[in-house]
Amino acid sequence: MNGSNFQVGDRVKVLLNSGFWRSTGWFKGRVVRIDEYSPHRSFYWVELDTAVQAAQGGSVNMVSVFNPRNIQLAE
């Protein structure tokens, strides 16, 4: 899915890598804000699910995603 189709409130999963996160993988959350960068790209602010936050020590509750390959609708 093209990232431009996401809306605030959508349930999504984001790909976080071990350089930023404890482990590489897809983590679930909800889109809470969209900041347009250009007519074709946006930053998607995703509030991570409480269980994801807790598993990572609770220090990060929101991430921004710019690369559309790193965000998908959650099933």
Image (spheres, rainbow, N blue to C red):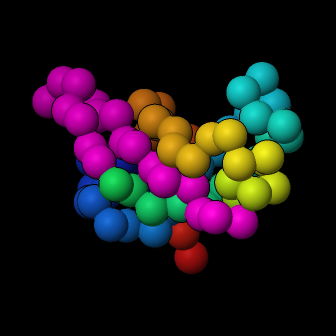
**Residue name at image x 45 percent, y 62 percent:** 30
Viewer-nearest residue: 62 or 72: 62
**Residue name at image x 48 percent, y 53 percent:** 47
Farthest residue in the right direction?
Answer: 23
Farthest residue in the left direction?
Answer: 39
Is the magenta region chiefly helix, strand or loop? Answer: strand
The question of residue 48 being in magenta is answered with: yes
**Left or right side of 28 for 25:** right
Tell me the quarter of the image containing the N terminus. bottom left
Viewer-nearest residue: 22 or 7: 22
Q: Would residue 40 be seen by someone viewing this image from the given angle? A: no
**Residue name at image x 78 percent, y 23 percent:** 19
Total numbered labels placed on residues in the image: 0
**71 relative to 54, above or below:** above
Q: Would residue 9 be seen by someone viewing this image from the given angle? A: yes
**Left or right side of 72 for 26:** right
Res 49 quadrant in image: bottom right
Q: Position of residue 29 (x, y in %)?
A: 54, 61
Farthest residue in the front direction?
Answer: 58
Viewer-nearest residue: 70 or 27: 27
The magenta region covers 33-51
Q: Position of residue 70 (x, y in %)?
A: 55, 41
**Residue name at image x 47 percent, y 36 percent:** 65
The question of residue 75 being in magenta is answered with: no
Res 10 quadrant in image: bottom left
Res 8 quadrant in image: bottom left
Q: Position of residue 62 (x, y in %)?
A: 51, 44
Tell me the quarter of the image containing the C terminus. bottom right
